Amino acid sequence: MAESSLLERSQDVSEVDRSGLKVAATILVPAILALAASYLFLAGHNIWSIVLILLFINLFALQAFLLKNSSQVWLALALSTLGLVIPFYSINLNYLATAALVIFFFFVTGAFPARHELNNSLKLSFSRVARKVMVGGMTGIAGGITVLIVSGALGSSVFSIGNIDKYVVDPYIVAPAVEYATHQTYVPNETVKDFLTNQIESSVVTVNGNSISVGSLPASEKNLVVSGAISSSVSQINSSMGVSIDVNSSISDNLLNVMGQKVSQLGQPMKLIVILSLYIILWSTVLLLATILAYVLTVIAFLIFEFLVMTKFAEVQMESRSHEVVTLQ
């Protein structure tokens, strides 16, 4: 449905001046949605914030079709960017400016290539143009969130470093690895001490020629064996890996800490290579997810576009024009 050409529904008339009020609405409504989404996000209303962001992405994509003048597009992109970052005014100005620049850059790389295709094609699909804008928009928002995470401005929100560790690293990286290595069920956010205690208590030792479980030993003996084994295990890990393990922190926390320590121990060239590799992996993942989501959102954007045409807010027209070309004779 969204693949249909706009020309198939056009009227054979030349373009007329557009309503200033409609142009203003096309520019301001997405910016207001962006502003509201950021405020709701900071207020902890994550679900409504996501709903408004998805609606913003749809209207953001429609701006490529509804705004004819490039200056109007620049203004729309700038206001949408400001709407997203203004609620974070209390953070360090350098971080705020960086987040705004990242968002604005990806907004531009999504909007203007799409407009170029729109302006230079006789027959084009709605979905292809809309997806280009959407991918740029979603990538820009992800980039801004990344900057805000680094700045610590997201506090205890769902995108804070602590919650990313809790909801992403722990269940999807640590848990599968630990369960594969130990063949035992992993307890979410389990501390290193608790994990080693469970492992040691389930192991078997030989006492007076008899094999018994450590967990079945008298409490005093069990505590002595467990504490000694934990101390020995942690010492071996610290010695072999050249890092410091905190037994009272979760495995995922220690994993991130170890990675940070390892990166900090590298020379400058290798450190840059590692950081660059991580960014490439991150942005490749973001682009993949944004592209997949754009296919879904394009359908919604097309329905909104149909509604705007049906209510006469927008009108598809045929524009006859000629232009100069250079040829070799």
Image (tube, grey):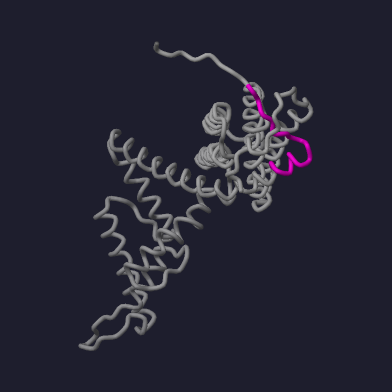
- Tell me if residue 248 comes above or below residue 71 in the rendering: below
Which residue shows up at 36% across the image and 56% down it?
245
Foreground: 100 or 54? 54
119 sits to left or right of 13 = left
Q: Quadrant of residue 94?
A: top right
Residue that extends furthest to the front in the rendered view of this protein: 329
Q: Quadrant of residue 90?
A: top right
Q: Position of residue 295 (x, y in %)?
A: 55, 48
Which residue shows up at 65% across the image and 25% down it?
319
Q: Quadrant of residue 59?
A: top right
- Tell me if residue 151 comes above or below residue 293 in the rendering: above
Which quadrant of the figure contains the C terminus?
A: top left
323 sits to left or right of 312 = left
Which residue shows up at 25% across the image and 55% down it?
239
Q: Position of residue 185 (x, y in %)?
A: 41, 72
Q: Position of residue 111 (x, y in %)?
A: 57, 31
Q: Position of residue 72 (x, y in %)?
A: 67, 24
Q: How many marks?
A: 0
Residue 49 in sight from this viewpoint:
yes
Foreground: 314 or 148? 314
Is residue 310 found inside the magenta-colored segment of the image?
yes
Residue that extends furthest to the left in the rendered view of this protein: 209
Which residue shows up at 32% across the image and 46% down it?
262
Residue interval drawn in magenta: 305-320
Foreground: 112 or 84? 112
Q: Main secondary structure of the magenta part?
A: loop
Residue 101 in sight from this viewpoint:
no
- Tell me if residue 19 comes above or below residue 5 in the rendering: above
